[in-house]
Image (cartoon, grey):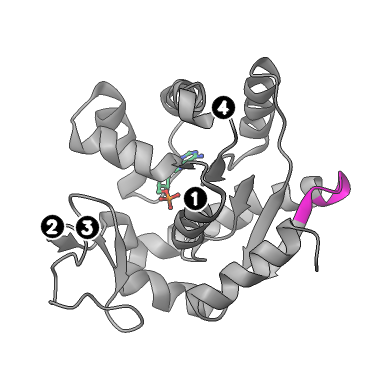
Amino acid sequence: MILMGPPGAGKGTQAKLLEQHFQVPHVSSGDLLRNAIKQKTKMGVEAKRFMDRGELVPDAVLLQAIEDRLQQADCRTGFILDGFPRTLPQVDALCAMVTSMGTKIDRVTSLRVPKEAVVKRISGRRTCHDCGAMYHVTYDPPTTPEICDRCHGELYQREDDREETVMARLEVYERQTAPLLAAYRTCGLLREVDGVGSQHEVLERILAVVQGNA
Ligand code: AMP
């Protein structure tokens, strides 16, 4: 399954809940890149300058890492993609990857959230340095400010979650990623879900459309 939606739509949060529900891994291109940055790999160094500006990382830097991840054993029974594909060439690359794995994409779910809500959500978002868990200073604060409830790691604001960069990321989404929705709609794969509400409400809506009850 592919989970789509603008930055701040709640894809990461929902993908983690879906991972538990379906017992298949959450594969986030953003997390793969952030881990590479943390580990200072060649991919991380190359990706960082694009990410800090809110721009897309070139396919030459990212695609192999996605393919390697999808070929790991835990993806054999399925996976939830978050943040990939983001462009039409990436859709083609993904098609080639899943075909060579002998599988296919069953569903594309897109979370709809108004722009003003997205900006509020992202600018208050805090991420754990160690385990990647996400919080929101107002909507989902940690028990102790700036400390992760799960692993006691330090929380930080992603460089690309600052307000100036958020606007650039939204613009990139509208220009490069939103057109994918029309393509998925045409081929009957797309299910759109209202992304406003509690984590649980949004999860229930996703499960209803994925399981064909809505
Ligand atoms: P995300 O965590 O999905 O919001 O991604 C954070 C940043 O990582 C994006 O703003 C891009 O710079 C980069 N990125 C993540 N996924 C992709 C992708 N599929 N293609 C290109 N760049 C990506």
Q: Which type of secondary structure does the marked residue at label 4 adopt?
A: loop
The type of residue carrying mark 2 is Gly
Q: CA distance from mark 1 to mark 2?
A: 22 Å
Foreground residue, 202 or 188? 202
Residue 209 seen in the current view: yes
**Magenta residues (range):** 185-190
Which residue was labeled with disc 2? 153
Which residue was labeled with disc 4? 76
Q: Quadrant of the C terminus?
A: bottom right
Relative to 107, residue 110 above or below: below
Identity of the residue drawn at 44% across and 28% down: 62
Residue 114 seen in the current view: no
Identity of the residue drawn at 70% across and 49% down: 108
Tell me which label, 2 or 3, sits earlier in the chain. Answer: 3
Identity of the residue drawn at 48% across and 72% down: 118
Q: CA distance from mark 1 to mark 3?
A: 19 Å
The type of residue carrying mark 4 is Arg
Instruction: Bin the neighbour count of mark 2 within 10 Å (Cα to Cα): few under 14, some 14-19, many 20 and up.
Output: some
Q: Which mark is residue 128?
A: 3
Asked if disc 2 and disc 3 are in contact, CB closer than 8 Å, the reply is yes
Instruction: Bin the neighbour count of mark 4 within 10 Å (Cα to Cα): few under 14, some 14-19, many 20 and up.
Output: some
Direction from residue 133 to residue 146 in the image, left or right: left
Tell me which label, 4 or 2, sits earlier in the chain. Answer: 4
Please identify the quarter of the rendering in which residue 165 is found. Answer: bottom left
Tell me which label, 1 or 3, sits earlier in the chain. Answer: 1
Asked if disc 3 and disc 4 are in contact, CB closer than 8 Å, the reply is no
The type of residue carrying mark 1 is Glu
Identity of the residue drawn at 40% across and 44% down: 30
Q: Quadrant of the N terminus?
A: top right
